[in-house]
Image: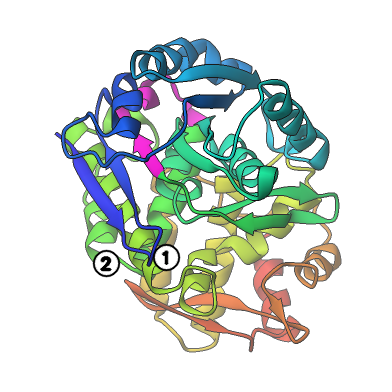
């Protein structure tokens, strides 16, 4: 059971491979020796970047696969957690690239979740003015979102992902089997992004999730259902990125739930509420705003909330958050244009649009209701 999705970007198309057990064939996918693989035409030197937890589970398997394919592999570990997604941590990746004498033909391999993927991708984008990067996501959140589309970066103390670059991967290799070691909270967080795709792009995915009895732990998903979730989510992201690589317009719909979500993350120090939990809260807020503006129905909004709750995700703001601080944080968001905050809002299941007409007068009562 294997799915290969192509992101058809001009001059830099790449494949998303979803293959159970695929981690053991990482090197073969990079050299083109795996079935249906395209050679990436890389040099021999590879720097694998991971964190201690992920590396302990999967690092040696990844290295063995790369070495078997003829690569010279070094590895570098960075601390786990969003709070370490900083310029200081990025500097250590640069130091490792220098120490191991990476060349313009060398490749960075990101083995881990979204934090590892974002930082490694940004290091690849900026070291020697651009090296290849291969994304090997090990969390569901990274598999369905962060590893696809080329957004890379680190956080600034005043906001999430304010420092970054677009740098598309040469390959995304997804092995669903590694999710069996994923903590329950991380699995639930990722379901927020899956639900997001159902709301903004793929009504069929949304309805398939509604038909599931439980979505709050991976053991409740069959292998076929997990493959379907991964494939539909990756295809949705690929479809949007192919039409709007650098977020000129359409791609901004992928920020559904992220506007308020990023504010919640930053104001809680990236430790109390994780990314997926914050996005879930943000989707509830955005859904209620859409109802108030007449963009979609209360019934659709309620269906979204039930699905978020089924996944075991929060639907309320942390009680200690100051609403004025949330509203002020939105003005520092990357999605601000001409001084106006741009929101992705649903217009029905499977469809979303961007608007800058969400005023404080509209948003404040919604946020008050979510406390």
What residue is at 46 percent from the left and 56 percent from the top?
A: 149
Residue 124, image x, y percentages: 61, 42
Is 180 magenta? The answer is: yes
What residue is shown with label 2?
203
**What residue range appears in magenta?**
171-185
Mark 2 residue element: helix
Looking at the image, which is closer to me, 150 or 288?
150
Residue 99, image x, y percentages: 72, 21
Regarding residue 323, the answer to whether it shows in the image is: yes
Q: Which mark is residue 196?
A: none
Q: Are marks 1 and 2 in contact (CB under 8 Å)?
A: no
Q: Residues within 10 Å of mark 2 (few under 14, many from 20)?
A: some
Residue 352: which quarter of the image? bottom left
What residue is at 46 percent from the left and 10 percent from the top?
A: 60
Q: CA distance from mark 1 to mark 2?
A: 18 Å
Looking at the image, which is closer to me, 203 or 174?
174
Is 80 magenta? The answer is: no
What residue is shown with label 1?
241
Residue 325, image x, y percentages: 85, 63
The number of discs equals: 2
Residue 119, image x, y percentages: 65, 40
Of the numbered discs 1 and 2, the one sitting upstream in the chain is 2
Position of residue 221 relative to residue 359, above or below, is above
Regarding residue 318, the answer to whether it shows in the image is: no
Q: Residues within 10 Å of mark 1 (few under 14, many from 20)?
A: many
Position of residue 267 relative to residue 269, above or below, is below
Mark 1 residue element: helix
**Taking 331 as reference, is 206 left or right?**
left
């Amino acid at each position: 059971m294997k799915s290969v999705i192509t992101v058809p970007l001009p001059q830099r198309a790449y494949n998303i491979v979803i293959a159970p057990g695929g981690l053991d064939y990482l090197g073969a996918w990079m050299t083109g020796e795996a079935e249906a693989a395209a050679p990436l035409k890389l040099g021999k030197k590879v720097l694998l970047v991971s964190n201690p937890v992920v590396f302990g589970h999967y690092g040696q398997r990844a290295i063995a696969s790369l070495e078997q394919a003829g690569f010279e592999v070094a590895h570098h570990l960075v601390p786990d957690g969003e709070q370490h997604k900083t310029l200081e941590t990025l500097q250590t990746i640069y130091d490792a690239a220098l120490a191991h004498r990476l060349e313009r033909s060398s490749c960075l391999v990101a083995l881990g979740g979204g934090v590892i993927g974002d930082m490694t991708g940004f290091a690849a984008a900026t070291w020697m003015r651009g090296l290849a990067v291969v994304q090997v996501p090990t969390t569901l959140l990274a598999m369905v979102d962060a590893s696809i589309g080329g957004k890379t970066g680190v956080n600034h103390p005043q906001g999430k992902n304010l420092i970054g670059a677009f740098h598309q991967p040469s390959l995304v290799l997804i092995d669903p089997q590694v999710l069996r070691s994923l903590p329950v909270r991380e699995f639930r967080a990722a379901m927020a992004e899956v639900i997001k795709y159902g709301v903004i792009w793929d009504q069929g995915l949304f309805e398939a999730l509604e038909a599931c009895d439980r979505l709050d732990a991976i053991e409740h998903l069959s292998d076929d259902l997990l493959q379907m979730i991964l494939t539909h989510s990756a295809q949705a992201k690929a479809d949007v990125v192919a039409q709007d690589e650098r977020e000129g317009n359409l791609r901004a719909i992928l920020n559904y739930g992220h506007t308020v979500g990023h504010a919640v993350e930053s104001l809680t120090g990236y430790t109390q509420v994780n990314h997926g939990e914050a996005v879930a809260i943000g989707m509830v807020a955005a859904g209620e705003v859409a109802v108030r503006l007449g963009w979609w129905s209360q019934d659709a909004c309620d269906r979204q909330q039930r699905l978020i709750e089924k996944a075991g995700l929060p639907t309320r703001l942390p009680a200690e958050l100051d609403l004025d601080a949330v509203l002020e944080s939105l003005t520092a968001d990357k999605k601000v244009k001409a001084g106006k905050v741009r929101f992705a809002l649903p217009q029905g299941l499977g469809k979303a649009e961007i608007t800058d007409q969400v005023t404080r007068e509209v948003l404040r009562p919604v946020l008050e209701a979510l406390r």
